[in-house]
């Protein structure tokens, strides 16, 4: 008998998906196996496809479970079945690649067999992969804070979005953070969408100065919850709704209503509970596609901040090429020591 069990086959949407080593333990603390991860994605294939279908998607793969190394697969893996669709994307460097583009639920079971835990979709859809249709705000608490702090800041995010004419849909990140998603019209490029997130983040910081910050450098955050505006940059992604996270508990990033967000804890949702939660509560993000919003107000705020407050472009991640208008990419304490 095989070390981790004989291969089994699942029927998913008319496709036969072979799963090898189904008894391989991916989450040692709880004994959660590869088979359980695959079954999670089969059960939630419908709402997951609604969330990330037709999107270039990076696979975060843990071939040996969370005890081993992981890597981000930004290209279609070799040997992928012909029904695993793909789409060409362009990285900030200008290089191009063909990335997985989910078009049917079987793709998720196939990817889970390769050790994929998280799906990291781009905020774009085919055929226009240069104009996002999803604005994402990553509410990221520091080590000394927790989920409750992120929830409080997310409430301010909700207010700011409303004042900008936008409707946000929250979800747990699967860790201590909160992600807020907004459906937008695909009329702006990545730079403009990132500027909109910067403007929204600055407004959140103004309204909750002791709780939230948009400061890129950790030394300037002073224990406040970070609005990670660079998650809006090209090739930066967050784990999708219903994604399994590489935590000891096998938590799942779960879409919620704003009311539910204040009543739950991220640990409530994991590989063994998320499907039952969906069966009982449905998908509160399903309504997100009913209306797409514009970024005019947020971009007006960005221009206002530059004109009236001298606040303009902010640092990009360190692996990016130097971007137009970007300030020096060096943390303030080092910049002061060099003068």
Image (spheres, rainbow, N blue to C red):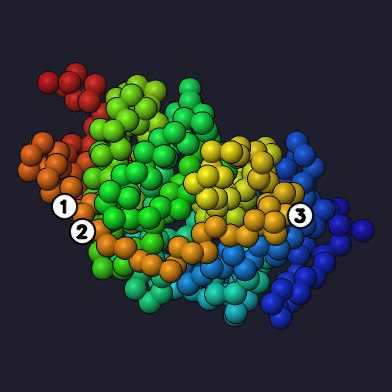
* Mark earlier in primary sequence (1, 3): 3
- Tag 2–tag 1 contact (CB < 8 Å): yes
Query: Height in image: 48 above or below 333?
Result: below
- Tell us which disc is closer to us: 1 or 3: 1
Q: Residues within 10 Å of mark 3 (few under 14, many from 20)?
A: some
What element does badge 1 sit on? Answer: helix
What element does badge 3 sit on? Answer: helix
Q: Is residue 117 left or right of residue 139?
A: right
- Tag 1–tag 3 contact (CB < 8 Å): no
Q: Is residue 227 left or right of residue 38?
A: left
Label 3 belongs to which residue? 36
Label 2 belongs to which residue? 296
User: Could you tell me which quadrant the C terminus lies in?
Assistant: top left
- Using the image, tell me which numbered label, if any, was put on residue 100: none
- Tag 3–tag 2 contact (CB < 8 Å): no
Q: Nearer the viewer, residue 329 or 150?
A: 150
Q: Is residue 286 left or right of residue 276?
A: left
| Residue in the image at 26% along x and 68% along y | 187
- The residues bearing labels 1 and 3 have C-alpha atoms spaced at a distance of 47 Å
Q: Nearer the viewer, residue 291 or 51?
A: 291
| Residue in the image at 49% along x and 64% along y | 287
- Using the image, tell me which numbered label, if any, was put on residue 300: 1
Residue 1: image quadrant is bottom right
Query: Height in image: 98 above or below 244?
Result: below
Q: Residue furthest left?
A: 307
Query: Height in image: 204 above or below 285?
Result: above
Q: Position of residue 195 (x, y in %)?
A: 23, 50
Q: Is residue 25 visible?
A: yes
């Amino acid at each position: 008998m095989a070390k981790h069990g004989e291969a089994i086959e699942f029927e998913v949407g008319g496709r036969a998906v072979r799963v090898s080593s189904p008894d391989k333990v991916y989450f040692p603390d709880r004994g959660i196996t590869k088979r359980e991860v695959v079954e999670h994605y089969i059960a939630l294939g419908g709402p997951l496809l609604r969330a990330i279908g037709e999107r270039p998607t990076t696979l975060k793969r843990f071939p040996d479970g969370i005890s081993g190394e992981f890597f981000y697969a930004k290209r279609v893996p070799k040997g992928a079945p012909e029904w695993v669709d793909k789409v060409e994307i362009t990285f900030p460097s200008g290089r191009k690649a063909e990335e997985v583009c989910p078009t049917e639920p079987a793709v998720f079971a196939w990817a889970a067999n390769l050790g994929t835990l998280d799906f990291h979709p781009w905020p774009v859809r085919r055929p226009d992969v240069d104009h996002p249709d999803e604005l994402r705000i990553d509410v990221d608490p520091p080590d000394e804070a927790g989920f409750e702090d992120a929830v409080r800041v997310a409430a301010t995010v909700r207010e700011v979005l409303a004042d900008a004419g936008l409707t946000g849909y929250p979800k747990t990140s699967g860790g201590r953070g909160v992600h807020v998603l907004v459906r937008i019209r695909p009329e702006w490029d990545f730079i403009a969408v990132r500027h909109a997130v910067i403007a929204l983040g600055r407004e959140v910081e103004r309204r909750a100065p002791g709780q939230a910050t948009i400061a890129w450098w950790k030394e300037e955050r002073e224990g406040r919850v970070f609005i990670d505006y660079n998650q809006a940059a090209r090739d930066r992604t967050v784990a999708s709704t219903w994604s399994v996270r590489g935590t000891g508990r096998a938590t799942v990033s779960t879409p919620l209503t704003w009311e539910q967000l204040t009543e739950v804890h991220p640990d409530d949702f994991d590989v063994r509970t998320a499907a039952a939660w969906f069966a009982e509560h449905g998908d509160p993000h399903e309504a997100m596609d009913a209306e797409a919003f514009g970024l005019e107000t947020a971009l007006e705020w960005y221009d206002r901040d530059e004109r009236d407050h001298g606040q303009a472009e902010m640092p990009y991640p360190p692996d990016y090429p130097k971007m137009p208008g970007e300030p020096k990419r060096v943390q303030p304490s080092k910049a002061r020591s060099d003068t």
